[in-house]
Amino acid sequence: LPPAPAVAPSAVEPWRARAAHAADEAVATARRLGDPALLAFALNGAFMQSFGTCGGTTRRDPIGRELVGLGTAHGLPGHELLGRLIRIQALSGQGRYTEADTQAEAADLLADRHERPLASVFTAWYRALRTSESDSWTTARPLYATALARTGSSAMPGLADGAEALLRLLPVMREPGALPAPGILDGTPPGPYHPWLEPLLLAGRGEPEQARRALDTVPRPPHDLLQEPLWCLLARTASAVGHRRILRRAIDELTPAAAESAGGGSGLLSYGPVADHLAAASASLDEA
């Protein structure tokens, strides 16, 4: 059998478009009914459906702001807390760290008041990201170690699995054109990120043919908070081994996020400005 096609077509899948439309209709219906709790619930749904493409922080920040407003006005602390966490992520993706700091402080106070300890896991990640961006990776490393430890004991496997592997690649991805040294992830399971990390690791081990074959069948990164850094990983690998199809696709996918940081919108980590990764990918495509 021929190899499976790499990643799906770039157009938003019909089912995803329908889900986003349904979420928007739910918000509109809740507004007409004038029920604050129902509206907050619907806005949460709109947030969950805001990942159809890369670069959605400008849509998610207003959702977070409205959730904060509803929560404070109508005594809905859970929704207020969600809104503040959404704003931390969105503002981080846009590099608006002073505003994100304010949201993190408010989230910690709210979580402490209402005994929501898991919120502090996310603010710990944010503060590590903030330090990495405003100071250095070296300074941020102990903060990231603390965030990883707290995540591991938080019963949130969806956040914990593979997070350390993505972090280990952060200094590599912040250096233009760099590839990871062989063994960089020894003892660090890539978890669910294996399909997108493996091609880069192969390229770093000096196995370009194997890396190209891995790119031939790589699935599209999930439509979630980490799709931008995963696309940057693919772009870096494709540049290194001359895989034009993945390069073109990565450029297409990342372009809507050109004004954001690669991963900052997750509130977890950043591989640097998406614009820098786009410029490097475009240059490689011209040379290939």
Image: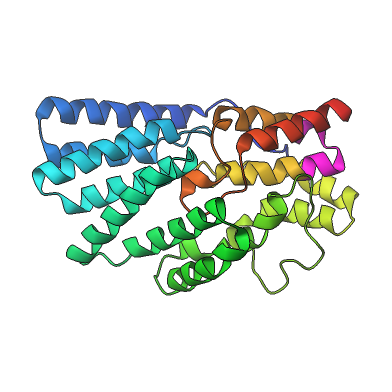
Instruction: Give the residues in magenta.
Output: 237-246
* Colour convention of the picture: rainbow
In the image, 211: left or right of 109? right
Where residue 89 appears, as percent x and y from the top left, is 42, 46
Where residue 44 appears, as percent x and y from the top left, is 29, 42
Where residue 24 appears, as percent x and y from the top left, is 30, 27
Residue 229 in view: yes
* Quadrant position of the N terminus in the picture: top right
Which residue sits at x=42%, y=31%? 58
Rendering quarter of residue 73: top left
Which residue sits at x=56%, y=62%? 163
Q: Relative to residue 167, is residue 232 depicted above or below?
A: above
Which residue sits at x=55%, y=63%? 140
Residue 2 in view: no
Return the residue nearer the eye: 261 or 67: 261
Return the residue nearer the eye: 124 or 241: 124
Rendering quarter of residue 113: bottom left
Specify the farthest residue to the front: 135
Q: Relative to residue 39, is residue 268 depicted above or below?
A: below
Decide whether the magenta segment is chiefly helix, strand or loop. helix
245 in magenta:
yes
In the image, 167: left or right of 279? left
Return the residue nearer the eye: 84 or 50: 84
* Quadrant position of the C terminus in the picture: top right
Return the residue nearer the eye: 12 or 167: 167
Which residue sits at x=29%, y=67%? 117
Q: How many marks?
A: 0
113 in magenta:
no
Where residue 104 appears, as percent x and y from the top left, is 34, 54
Q: Relative to residue 210, is residue 183 depicted above or below?
A: below
